[in-house]
Amino acid sequence: MFPLRRNRRLRANESIRSLIRETIISPNDFIVPLFVVEGSNIREEIPSMQNYFRLSLDKLEKEVNELWKLGLKSVLLFVKVPDNLKDNQGKEALNPNGLMQRAIKTVKNACPEMIVMTDVALDPYSIYGHDGIIENGQIANDATSLFLAEMSVAHAQAGADIVAPSDMMDGRILEIREALEDNGFSNTGIMSYSAKYASAHYGPFRDALDSAPVDLQNIPKDKKTYQMDYHNRLEAIRETRMDIEEGADIVMVKPGIAYLDIVREVKNMSEVPVAVYQVSGEYCMIKAAAEKGWIDHDAVMMEQVTAIKRAGADLIASYFAKDVVKLIS
Ligand code: PBG
């Protein structure tokens, strides 16, 4: 008697393994998140995100050119807003000469074909570190959505290709789509953070932008009234369906590795491309363990981005994008 099927035949050597490989990572899989700061000649490492930097506009230009040469075709911009420009309404976000607006133009001037995506949410602009406007100690849904629509138009005016609302207010995709259409930006796309969980994996990102929710009386201490409860899967489906109906061009699941069941379910029901955000906490865990010598950095990095793609991601927003592309090229 011999085994009915010898599966190991197709694993016997690297050639045969390559031939039957199902999931291949390429530069087209990635969105590169970038953190932008005021000033010049600044490339400061984010303490909790080893080898990841906040960039002033001159350094942003250099970075974008480098990314393009590596075959990376999209960036997702985040700005670190000076404290004196923060308020409860996010007013600075609409400043035509604000940091985000200048960052968009910098990327587009340096590299016109690079797809520029912009983060749309209040937290970097909020004195409270929340994604929305606070009224009576609560995140005001509809007022926030209206504001995010204005913010999206402002980004489109500055040249953004795709706006990426990361706030989780109800109804904001429709509000944003209408505002873009009304203002002549019918070609500006929306990538919606549709299934964004209230996760403990965002800490380093909040360090990078100094945007953590403040600890003040009468202000919610966390984002659990708008980001999703990680015990749940059904609402991820509902959120995604609604965002597609409201006009999202791309939907997103976030975070990545701990949510691959959700990624697969969303992929199976979605008629639009699915993005996954491999977030800051996922990044720093690999960096820290590798620094300790406890894991092989490159091997774990490749395994995790491949797992995210295998689960159904059409696009991966990842701080590893550059490392991965250098490794596979
Ligand atoms: C904020 C925003 C967050 C991230 C992307 N956009 C943080 C948050 O919701 O508190 C997290 C990304 C990361 O951790 O890498 N709207």
Image: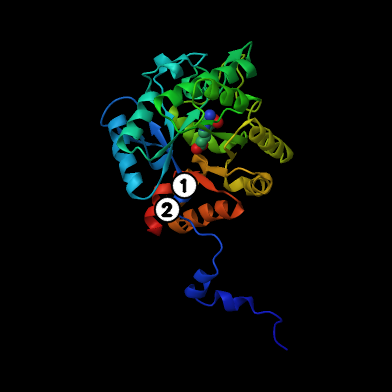
Quadrant location of the N terminus in the rendered image: bottom right
Q: Report the side of 237 relative to 29 (left or right).
A: right
Query: Marks 1 and 2, how far apart in space?
Result: 10 Å
Q: Nearer the viewer, residue 169 or 213?
A: 169
Residue 34 screen position, x and y as percent:
41, 36
Do we see residue 214 in this rendering? no
Which amino acid, by three-letter code, is at mark 2? Val
Q: Nearer the viewer, residue 5 or 210?
A: 5
Q: Which of the labelled discs sits on residue 30, or is there none?
A: 1
Q: Nearer the viewer, mark 1 or mark 2?
A: 1
Q: Which of the labelled discs sits on residue 145, or is there none?
A: none
Q: Which residue is mark 2?
A: 324
Q: Report the side of 202 relative to 92 (left or right).
A: right
Q: Is mark 2 within 8 Å of ligand 1?
A: no
Q: Is residue 218 above or below residue 167?
A: above
The answer to which image quadrant residue 249 occupies is top right
Residue drawn 53% across the image and 53% down it: 304
Earlier in the chain: of badge 1 and badge 2, it is 1
